[in-house]
Image (spheres, rainbow, N blue to C red):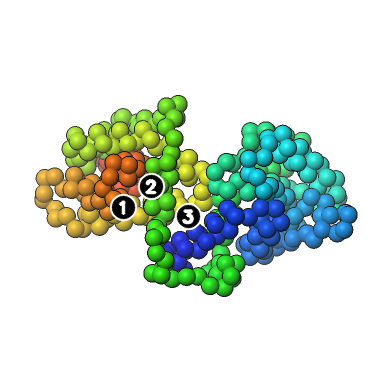
Amino acid sequence: MNLDKLYIARVIFKNRILSSHGQVFEDLFVRVMQAYDKDFRPVKPQGREGDKKNDGFNKTKGQYYQVYSPENSSDKEKESYKKLDSTFEELYKYWQPISPIKEFYWVYNDRFQTGVYPSIERALAEIEQKHEIKADPFLSKHLEDAFLSLPEFEIIEILGGHLPDHNYIEDVSITVLGEVIDFLIRGKFNPNNITFPNEINFDKKIRFNKLSKVFATLLRTAFHQDYIINEYFNYNSKFAKENLKTVFSNFYKEAIEEIPDGIPEKADLVFDYILNKARPRNNMAETNAVLTLMAHYFESCDIYEEPVEPKQNSLF
């Protein structure tokens, strides 16, 4: 599946997650996991007995899943904690003698934005210590990762047997780049989370790539907002991070090929090329968002060259 089709599949699937709760979300989770893990077995509720808090498991690996997707994602912390505590105790009591539990996953539809409460993390840690098993949250981003790793025919089948052509979708940005720019524009300023680049590494890379003072200052300033990008990555699937890395790396490669060698200000022209390629419109908000992304990928050496340490001469 090419990148355009995969992105469209991601958009449709993400909307399914955002609009799903309760049994609808559980059914979606089970459908994806059955395709993702051929040893995954859903558990059908049995009258008053229910499913003994087991919504699906892999007997071979000892992996158990319990789905919690309330209609209101802003449910109270105390209610979530009680649900988890009672859920695991009942699951452990019934299923441990049948098939030993090695891993427990609290499947929570956080709708790509909330994660889980600290009390839930603590409860999972207590389960790990008490029962000597792995206990982790399984969030929307994890389900999306599983979905996007499936073969094309499985992805299309889960989405209903049809995937629209991106040429017929209007007024939708068919790139993760547009999505992240929008996230950055809407991001809230938090002085406690401001990120400062490692000045030594930044300066060394700037000098090595021969960037002018103006563009160097733009990168340093933009990197202060890097925490917003990391926030986006924390709540989204690996697809978004890898796609963005590829996008900016390709922009850089294009610029290097398009702009002739021998021009003294080539590094600055490359910078301007990437900026204009990446931003949808030339306005302040979108320019600042793209500069933040450029600083992120400059720091990780996905754009521009990493400084090469000179080889030491040796007499031996």
Tag 2: amino acid: Ile
Q: Are marks 2 and 3 in contact (CB under 8 Å)?
A: no
Q: Is residue 171 left or right of residue 83?
A: left
From the top left corner, tell me how far across and down residue 93 is, in percent.
85, 45
Q: Secondary structure at mark 2?
A: helix
Q: Nearer the viewer, residue 272 or 183?
A: 183
Label at residue 189: none
Q: Secondary structure at mark 3?
A: helix
Q: Which residue is mark 3?
A: 239
> Label 3 to label 1, Cα distance in Å?
21 Å
Identify the residue under disc 1: 280
Q: Amino acid at mark 1?
A: Pro
* Residue in the picture at 22% in, 42% down: 209
Disc 1 or 2, which lies upstream in sequence? 2
- Which residue: 39% across, 58% down? 173
| Camera sees residue 309 | no
1 and 2 marks in contact (CB < 8 Å): yes
